[in-house]
Amino acid sequence: MASSIVEHITRTGQFPCLFAQHASRTERLVFSFVDDLSKASFMKSASDLAEYLERAASWDGSPATAEPLVMVFHPERVAAPSVASYHQIAWSVLQFWHDVDPAPWPGTVAKDPHTPHWTMCFLGVQIFVNISNPAHRRRRSRNLGPALTLVINPRERFDKVAGDTPAGWKIRQRIRERIEAYDGLAHSPALGSYEAGEIEWRQYGLMESNEPRTDRCPFKMRRDAALEDTEQPNAIPAASGQQVSHNG
């Protein structure tokens, strides 16, 4: 499955995200595999994410050395009939991560996904989650093959390489032009800038059309009391190192 995703991203050179292309060619994609939708698999995904974020903390700030986490779900055991249904599965994973996260929600991050400056966080780290799935037909840039796939980066990387600056605007514009050429469809109006206060959660899972969205984010902040309840399963297991692997 890892090799097919690498081939999908690199085989034509037309995949819109230049950073994903570079990471794929230089074997800097980090893979995690999720077997099913059981609690054990969700817990393993949280452990893999924790291991990845620990690794990412030593990033030197260069786009050339960035290593995205590519979390791939078993295509036969985790299947859905539509884009929206795949999004629902993905948000259930993110909700689980939040519910078992032993770290408090960062004080600088909004708690309401429908307000500016909310983003998903885990272990105190802001992350961006790209939800790609095989139900996408028109929006091909969000289809990496037969499996539900979450492509995860610490969000600070986007601030560094494509932030709310003239240089960042230029990079984002170039990528959006490539998206439109690749998809044969205008880029989603949901794509925006976190730093500029544009809503983040809709960028995680894009819809097939560019019609205005009226849906609500399914993510729910857990009760503050759960942060202190050590009897609840909100402590992730130690990373085993068996699932997270380099490309190649």
Image (spheres, helix red, strand yellow):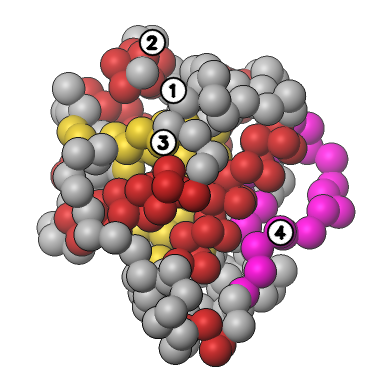
Please state the horizontal and vertical placement of residue 46, each as a whole percent of the image: 38, 55
State the residue position of label 4.
Answer: 218
Q: Earlier in the sequence, mark 2 or mark 4?
A: 2
Classify residue 78 by image quadrant: top right
Residue range in magenta is 201-221
Q: Gap between marks 2 and 3, in whole Å?
A: 28 Å
Q: Gap between marks 2 and 4, in whole Å?
A: 36 Å
- In the picture, measured across the screen, residue 5 lies left or right of residue 190, that is left
Q: Gap between marks 4 and 3, in whole Å?
A: 21 Å
Q: Earlier in the sequence, mark 2 or mark 3?
A: 2
Q: Amino acid at mark 1?
A: Phe
Whether residue 229 is situated above or below residue 126 in the rendered picture: below
Please state the horizontal and vertical placement of residue 159, each as a whole percent of the image: 38, 62
Q: Residue at x 20, y 39 (%)?
A: 242
Q: Does the magenta portion include 118?
A: no
Q: Amino acid at mark 3?
A: Val
Q: Does the magenta portion include 217?
A: yes
Whether residue 75 is situated above or below residue 210 in the rendered picture: above
Task: Tell whether label 4 touches label 1 (CB within 8 Å).
Answer: no
State the residue position of label 2.
Answer: 12
**Residue 34 disc label:** 3
Q: Quadrant of the C terminus?
A: top left
Q: Amino acid at mark 2?
A: Thr
Please state the horizontal and vertical placement of residue 165, each as a whole percent of the image: 43, 63
For the residue pair 69 and 48, the one nearer the viewer reads as: 48
Q: Amino acid at mark 4?
A: Pro
State the residue position of label 1.
Answer: 15
Between disc 2 and disc 4, the foreground one is: 4
